[in-house]
Image: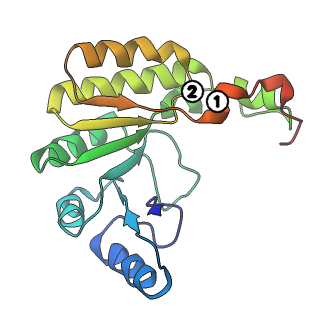
Amino acid sequence: IVDMPLNSIPSTVDVTALEVKQKVAAEQVTVDVGFWGGAIPGNLADLEPLWDAGVYGFKCFLAYSGLDEYPPLDREQMIEAMRVIAGFGGLLIVHAEDGPTLDAQDPPAGPRYDDFLYSRPPVAESRAVAQVIDGARQTGCRVHILHLSDAGSLPLVAAAKAEGLPVTAETCPHYLSLFSEEILDGS
């Protein structure tokens, strides 16, 4: 089991939070457990200690995560985190959606899935992917783009790989098999 830093409380953004989670896991879990650390505004000084304490790497969002206690990084904060993480050979995994682009969209008007999709245009992802790749180029940080859903961003990732940048990406199986017309309103 690998715990994402914001899927259980406390968010794993400092060593104290990691130790809480490690203790709970040691007392209750009988399988191997790993932890991702979080990169959020204001915790640059916590990144290397978290790495030294055993996290696999660091997750950040470039748009609102859904949790107030796990705010997104802006472009400059992401690059600063990349510089720190590159300094000790760590890995940054990025939920790549451009916050300002999403903030400029109208929220979904109702429960229709197509309205939700409209509120998250592909350009929000392609802009963020480009920012992540540019950050890797500037800092040498290893980065992994999570849950890629915009097929139009694939050429950006392929070009980064061809350039020799330490960039990887993945998608989710349901992104490959679901069509918006198959998703019921409110689902």
| Residue 1 x, y percent position in the rendering | 47, 64
Residue under the point 16% across and 48% down: 84
Residue bearing mark 1: 175
Secondary structure at numbered mark 2 = loop
Q: How many marks?
A: 2
Query: Marks 1 and 2: CB-CB under 8 Å?
Result: yes
Which colour style is shown?
rainbow
Cα gap from disc 1 to disc 2, whole angstroms: 6 Å
Q: Is residue 90 above or below residue 107?
A: below
Q: Amino acid at mark 1?
A: Tyr
Label at residue 149: 2
Residue under the point 46% across and 58% down: 4
| Residue 54 x, y percent position in the rendering | 25, 66
Q: What is the residue that sits farthest to the left in this orientation? A: 87
Q: Is residue 21 left or right of residue 102?
A: left
Q: Callout 2: 10 Å neighbours few (<14), some, many (20+)? A: some
